[in-house]
Image: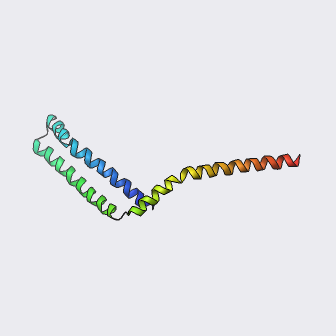
């Protein structure tokens, strides 16, 4: 279950990377060109980045195909139970303290 959630997070991260690369590739090419690199070299670098991102997207897409909606819903429901679990732990600890105090008062 955790692997499905990690895969889902990985897909989201790759989407963000793709967005950043596609929106800022032109700026990177301009900066490289200003520093003296040739246009063909900048295009080669941009092409390599695009190819690497494309292969990562394909891998993420394959992982996303194996994640079912029921797995995602199950993970979300587990997160919703965290506040209940915290309340139960707090109540348990409070009951234990009360029991210790009561047993100490009975001994006196």
The number of discs equals 0
Quadrant of the drawing holding the C terminus: top right
The answer to whether residue 3 is left or right of residue 41 is: right
The answer to whether residue 35 is left or right of residue 75 is: left
The answer to whether residue 100 is left or right of residue 31 is: right
Viewer-proximal residue, 38 or 59?
Answer: 59
- Residue 62, by quadrant, is bottom left
Q: Residue 61 in the image: x percent, y percent?
A: 29, 60
Q: Which color scheme is applied?
A: rainbow
The correct choice, above or below, for 65 with respect to 82 in the image is below
Q: Residue 43 in the image: x percent, y percent?
A: 13, 46
Q: Residue at x 27, y 56 (%)?
A: 57
The correct choice, above or below, for 23 with respect to 62 in the image is above
Quadrant of the drawing holding the N terminus: bottom left
Q: Residue 27 in the image: x percent, y percent?
A: 19, 38
The correct choice, above or below, for 34 with respect to 58 in the image is above
The answer to whether residue 56 is left or right of residue 99 is: left
Q: Residue at x 42, y 63 (%)?
A: 70
Q: Residue furthest top?
A: 34
Viewer-proximal residue, 28 or 103?
Answer: 103
Q: Residue at x 21, y 46 (%)?
A: 22
Viewer-proximal residue, 74 or 32?
Answer: 74
Q: Residue 93 in the image: x percent, y percent?
A: 68, 49
């Amino acid at each position: 279950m955790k692997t499905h959630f990690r895969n889902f997070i990985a897909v989201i991260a790759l989407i963000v990377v793709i967005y950043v690369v596609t929106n800022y590739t032109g700026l990177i090419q301009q900066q490289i060109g200003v520093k003296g690199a040739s246009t063909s070299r900048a295009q080669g670098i941009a092409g390599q980045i695009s190819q690497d991102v494309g292969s990562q997207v394909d891998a993420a897409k394959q992982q996303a195909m194996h994640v079912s909606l029921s797995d995602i819903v199950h993970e979300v429901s587990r997160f919703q139970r965290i506040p209940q679990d915290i309340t139960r732990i707090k109540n348990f600890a409070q009951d234990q303290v009360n029991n210790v105090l009561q047993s100490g008062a009975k001994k006196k």
